[in-house]
C-alpha cells in the first residue's frame, strides 16, 4: 500500500514540476522509460566515443593503415581482437576508424538533406499554391529515382571521395524531408498562435523560424535519426561497389568488399565489419522508434 | 475509374521527362571526355575533335539534352563505348534477370511478411510476437550485401549446398532472393502487424465478434481486407528499394542483371550505360507505383469514389 501512496505522491510532484520543466525535459522523461530506446542510445554513445577517440585507441597510420603482410589473414587473438585482414592490418582498429567515416557521412548527409529538404518543404507548406505545386512536383520527380541509384549517379559523376559521398547521399534523401516538413507546416500554419503572431506584425521569416519550425521539429528528429541509419547503409553500399572513400582509408562497406575474396580462408574479414554495421543501424533504429513514441505520445496506443 | 487511370498515366509523362533531365544533368558533369574514352588516351588531337563534333559534344548543354531526350524517346540511348552496341539493347537484355530476382525477392517477402505479421498481431505481446519483432528489427538493420556474403559463407562455402553466383537455374536464385527479400520481408511484417492491430481494435470487428462470427473468419474475412490496404502501398514503395538493392545483391552474386551491368559500367566510366540504367530503373519504378496506386483504388472503394 505504502508504495502506491508514494507513487501517487511522486506523480503529483512530477506533474507539478512538469509544468515548469521544458517540453524537452518531458520528452527525455518518456524516452528514459523506454528500455529499447535507452539500449539504442547507450550503444550510440559508445560508438560515438569510439569514433571520437579512435586515434587514442589505435593509431591511424601505424595500426589501421600500415601494411604488415607477415601478419596477414590472422584470426581473432589477444593482439588483434578481431583478427587481421589481407594486408595484415588490425580489423578492430579499421572498424573503429571506419566508424568515424560512417557516422560522419551519416550525420552530414542527413544535415544536408534536412537543411535543403526542410527549407523547401517549409516554403512549400507555408506559401502553398503555385510555389507548393512547383516544389512538390519537383520532389515527386526526385522520388521516382530509387535513392541509392540517384546517389550512385551523383558519385559517378562527381568522383568518389568523402565530400561527394556525403553530398550524394544527402541530396538523394531531400524529398523525404521536404514532404515531412511540409506536412507538419500545413498542420501548424492555420493554428491560432500563428494568427496571433501575424496580428502583432511578425514577419514571414520570423513566423517560420520562431514558430513554425520548432513545432515541426518532432517528426524531423525522428526521421533524421532513422535517416542517419539509412545514410550509413547507403555509404556502405556505395563503398561496396567501389564508390566510397578512396583506399587505404578504412570504410565498413569497402572492408566487406575486400573480404569477399577471402571468404573461404578468413571469413572474419567480412563478418566483423558487417556486424559493426548491423549494431550501428540496430541502435539507431531502436533510438528512432523510441524517439517517435517519446515525441508523439498520441501515436502510441 | 478510367478517368483516374488516364489521369495517372498522363502524370507519368512529366515525371519521366523530369527524371531524364535530372539524371542527364548529373551525368553531364562526369569528368573525362567521351571522345577520348572511345578513341583512347593517345588519339591525335584533330581526330578527337572530329569525333567530339560528330557526337555533338561541343553543343550547349540544353541542345545536347534535348537531342538526348528525342533519341531516348525512340529507345536510342546511344551506343556503348566498348561494344558499340546500342546501350538500350544492352540494358534491356539484362532486365529479365533483374526482374526475375526482384520478383522472387518480393514474393518471398510477401509470403513471409504478411502471414507472420497477421499471426503476430493476433497474438500481441506473446513470445512469438516478441521473437518476430526482434527478427524484423534485425532484418531492417542488416545491409543486404552483407547478408548475401554471410549466406554464401554458410550455404556455398561451408555446406556446399547452393551455388554462390551466376544465373544457373532455380538453385542459384535461392540465395540472392533471400538476400534481397529479407529487408523487405521485415518491413512488410512490421507494417502488416501494426495495420492489423489498428484494424482489430475497430468497432466493426467487435460487432462481428459479438455476432458470434468465428475468430478465424473475423480475421481472414473482416479484418484482413482493410488491414492489407496500407501494406499494398508499402509493397509498391519497396519495389524501388528492391531495384536499388538489386544493384548490390547482383554484385555479390554475380547476377547478370541491370545492376551489375551498371556497376561494371561505372568502373569503366561508360557514362551512357549508367545513365540509361538509372533512367530505365526509375521508369520501371514509376510504372510499378502507378500500378500499385491503381490496385489501391480497386482495393479501397473510398478512393475509387473520388474519381468517378
Image (cartoon, coloured by chain):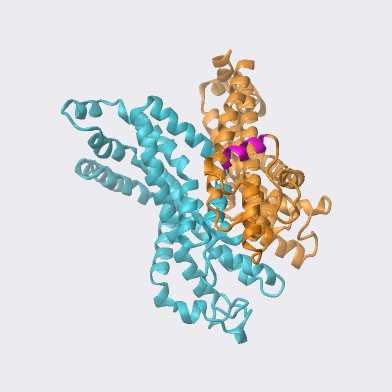
Residue situated in front as seen by the camera: A124 or B196: A124
Q: Residue B23 is drawn in which quadrant?
A: top right
Measured from the top left, where is residue B7 in percent x and y? Answer: 59, 21
Give the dominant element type of the magenta stretch: helix, strand or loop: helix
Measured from the top left, where is residue A19 in percent x and y? Answer: 21, 40
Measured from the top left, where is residue A242 in percent x and y? Answer: 60, 62
Q: Chain A takes which shade in the image?
A: cyan
Q: Is residue A82 above or below residue A216?
A: below
Quarter of the image with the C terminus of chain A in it: top left
Residue found at the far front of this picture: B46
Q: Chain B takes which shade in the image?
A: orange
Residue extent of the magenta highlight: B64-73
Residue situated in front as seen by the camera: A240 or A222: A240
Q: Is residue A191 above or below residue B82?
A: above
Quarter of the image with the N terminus of chain A in it: top left
Q: What residue is shown at x 37% (from left), y 27% (from top)?
A: A128
Q: Is residue B269 visible?
A: no
Q: Magenta includes B130?
A: no
Residue situated in front as seen by the camera: B203 or B272: B272
Q: Residue B239 is drawn in which quadrant?
A: top right
Q: Is residue B287 visible?
A: yes
Measured from the top left, where is residue A255 in percent x and y? Answer: 58, 68
Residue found at the far top of this picture: B308
Q: What residue is shown at x 25% (from left), y 46% (from top)?
A: A10
Q: Magenta includes B70?
A: yes
Amino acid at each position: 500500500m505504502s508504495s502506491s501512496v508514494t507513487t501517487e505522491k511522486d506523480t503529483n510532484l512530477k506533474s507539478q514540476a512538469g509544468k515548469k520543466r521544458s517540453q524537452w525535459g518531458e520528452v527525455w522523461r518518456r524516452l528514459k522509460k523506454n528500455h529499447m530506446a535507452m539500449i539504442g542510445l547507450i550503444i550510440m554513445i559508445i560508438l560515438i566515443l569510439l569514433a571520437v577517440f579512435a586515434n587514442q585507441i589505435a593509431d591511424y597510420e601505424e595500426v589501421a593503415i600500415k601494411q604488415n603482410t607477415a601478419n596477414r589473414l590472422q584470426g581473432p587473438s589477444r593482439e588483434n581482437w578481431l583478427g587481421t585482414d589481407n594486408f595484415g592490418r588490425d580489423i578492430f582498429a579499421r572498424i573503429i576508424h571506419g566508424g568515424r567515416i560512417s557516422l560522419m557521412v551519416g550525420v552530414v548527409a542527413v544535415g544536408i538533406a534536412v537543411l535543403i529538404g526542410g527549407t523547401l518543404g517549409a516554403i512549400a507548406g507555408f506559401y502553398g499554391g503555385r510555389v507548393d505545386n512547383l516544389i512538390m512536383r519537383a520532389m515527386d520527380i526526385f522520388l521516382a529515382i530509387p535513392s541509392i541509384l540517384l546517389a550512385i549517379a551523383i558519385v559517378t559523376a562527381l568522383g568518389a571521395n568523402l565530400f561527394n559521398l556525403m553530398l550524394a547521399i544527402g541530396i538523394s534523401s531531400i524529398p523525404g524531408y521536404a514532404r515531412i516538413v511540409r506536412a507538419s507546416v500545413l498542420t501548424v500554419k492555420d493554428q491560432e498562435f500563428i494568427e496571433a503572431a501575424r496580428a502583432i506584425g511578425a514577419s514571414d521569416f520570423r513566423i517560420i523560424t520562431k514558430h513554425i519550425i520548432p513545432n515541426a521539429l518532432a517528426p524531423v528528429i525522428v526521421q533524421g535519426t532513422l535517416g542517419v541509419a539509412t545514410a550509413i547503409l547507403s555509404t556502405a553500399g556505395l563503398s561496396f561497389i567501389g564508390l566510397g572513400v578512396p583506399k587505404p582509408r578504412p570504410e565498413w562497406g569497402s572492408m566487406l568488399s575486400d573480404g569477399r575474396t577471402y571468404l573461404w580462408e578468413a571469413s572474419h574479414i567480412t563478418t566483423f565489419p558487417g556486424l559493426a554495421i548491423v549494431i550501428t543501424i540496430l541502435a539507431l533504429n531502436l533510438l528512432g522508434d523510441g524517439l517517435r513514441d517519446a515525441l508523439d505520445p498520441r501515436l502510441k496506443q | 475509374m478510367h478517368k483516374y487511370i488516364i489521369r495517372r498515366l498522363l502524370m507519368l509523362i512529366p515525371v519521366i521527362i523530369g527524371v531524364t533531365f535530372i539524371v542527364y544533368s548529373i551525368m553531364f558533369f562526369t569528368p573525362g571526355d567521351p571522345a577520348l574514352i572511345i578513341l583512347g588516351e593517345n588519339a591525335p588531337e584533330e581526330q578527337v575533335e572530329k569525333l567530339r563534333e560528330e557526337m555533338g559534344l561541343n553543343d550547349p548543354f540544353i541542345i545536347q539534352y534535348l537531342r538526348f531526350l528525342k533519341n531516348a524517346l525512340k529507345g536510342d540511348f546511344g551506343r556503348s563505348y566498348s561494344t558499340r552496341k546500342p546501350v538500350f539493347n544492352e540494358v534491356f537484355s539484362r532486365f529479365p534477370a533483374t526482374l526475375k530476382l526482384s520478383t522472387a525477392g518480393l514474393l518471398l517477402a510477401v509470403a513471409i511478411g504478411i502471414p507472420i505479421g497477421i499471426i503476430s498481431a493476433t497474438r500481441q505481446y506473446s513470445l512469438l510476437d516478441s521473437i518476430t519483432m526482434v527478427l524484423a528489427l534485425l532484418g531492417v538493420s542488416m545491409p543486404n550485401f552483407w547478408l548475401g556474403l554471410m549466406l554464401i559463407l554458410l550455404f556455398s562455402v561451408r555446406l556446399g549446398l547452393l551455388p554462390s553466383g551466376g544465373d544457373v537455374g532455380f538453385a542459384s536464385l535461392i540465395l540472392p532472393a533471400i538476400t534481397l527479400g529479407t529487408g523487405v520481408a521485415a518491413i512488410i511484417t512490421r507494417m502488416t502487424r501494426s495495420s492489423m492491430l489498428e484494424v482489430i481494435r475497430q468497432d466493426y470487428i467487435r460487432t462481428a465478434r459479438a455476432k458470434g462470427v468465428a475468430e478465424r473468419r473475423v480475421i481472414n474475412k473482416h479484418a484482413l481486407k482493410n488491414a492489407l490496404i496500407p501494406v499494398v502501398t508499402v509493397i509498391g514503395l519497396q519495389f524501388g528499394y528492391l531495384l536499388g538493392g538489386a544493384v548490390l545483391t547482383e554484385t555479390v552474386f554475380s547476377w547478370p542483371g541491370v545492376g551489375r551491368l551498371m556497376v561494371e559500367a561505372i568502373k569503366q566510366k561508360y557514362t551512357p550505360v549508367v545513365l540509361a540504367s538509372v533512367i530505365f530503373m526509375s521508369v520501371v519504378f514509376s510504372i510499378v507505383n502507378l500500378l500499385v496506386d491503381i490496385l489501391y483504388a480497386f482495393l479501397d472503394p473510398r478512393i475509387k469514389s473520388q474519381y468517378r
